[in-house]
Amino acid sequence: NLSNNPKMKDAVNRILDNIFAMVEETVKTGKTDSAMSVVMEGDQGPRLLMASHVAGTDKLEDTLQELATMAEQDGDFPEIKFDVDKHRSVRFHQVVIPIADAKARKALGTGEINIFIGLSKTAMCLSAGDSSADSLKKAIDASADAGMQPVDPASFTVHVAPIVRAVASVMEQDEPEKAGQLREAVKELNGENDTLTGIGRAIKDGFAYRLELKEDVIRAIGAIVRLAQGQGFATSAP
């Protein structure tokens, strides 16, 4: 309870001040540049990778130090390990969070989440999951080697099949039949025909978005909706 712990309350206030200061400094640069990737399948399990242009990363460093102090005072806070690794100009800190929920442990294939927070002078990056730090380092190298590239102001690509299979894995214990039906709905999908793509472009006095779904994705979504309505599956083309 923060109201009963003045030191913790002061620490939270300092953390908020640091975050707001960092956001303000970033906004003043007039630049936004962020990327994120979630990998749902593979031998290494689910992994999250993200990176963003940030001004005033020293404020973020101060925030982590405050959180580390809170962790020392409160046994429920996970420990923050500083400077566990370095790659190019990025320094990595590590947080390990135990997973209490049994279904979440099964879905993720692990009993804990390894989170790595990377900081350089002008950017922050984050990875979560087993071997995610290695994946993040590869992404850093690829970005540095590619240099500045023209890109759309906003874009995303979602692969539907891995998400559905992950949901099926969570359902397996309690609803094995429905889990099998979910897998059946996306069995024909692969990395080429299971995408949902969105692109945003600036236009005069506004912003235009375009969404593109593969035909097989639309068919699979229809099958999943029928399952949710209790109607069973009919995944073959009409």
Image (spheres, rainbow, N blue to C red):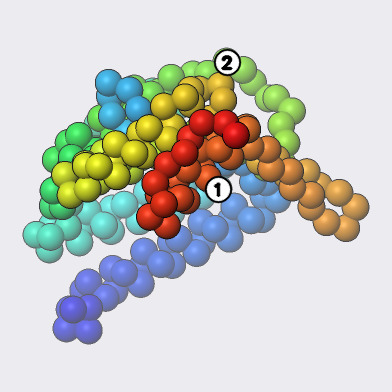
Q: What element carries label 1?
A: loop
Query: Which quadrant would the C terminus be assigned to in this image?
Result: top right
Q: Can you tell which mark lies on residue 149?
A: none
Q: Earlier in the sequence, mark 2 or mark 1?
A: 1
User: Which residue is identified by label 1?
Assistant: 55
Determine the residue positioned at 64% across, 20% down. 147
Q: Locate residue 144: give its quadrant.
A: top right
- Residue 158 on image: x %, y %: 53, 37
Determine the residue positioned at 50% across, 22% down. 191
User: Which residue is identified by label 2?
Assistant: 145
Q: Locate residue 33: give its quadrant.
A: top right
Up/down of 131 relative to 176, above or below: above
Few, some or many residues within 10 Å of mark 2 (<14, 14–19, 20+): few
Q: What residue type is labelled 1?
A: Ala
Up/down of 206 relative to 108, above or below: below
Q: In this view, does 232 lie to the left or right of 35?
A: left
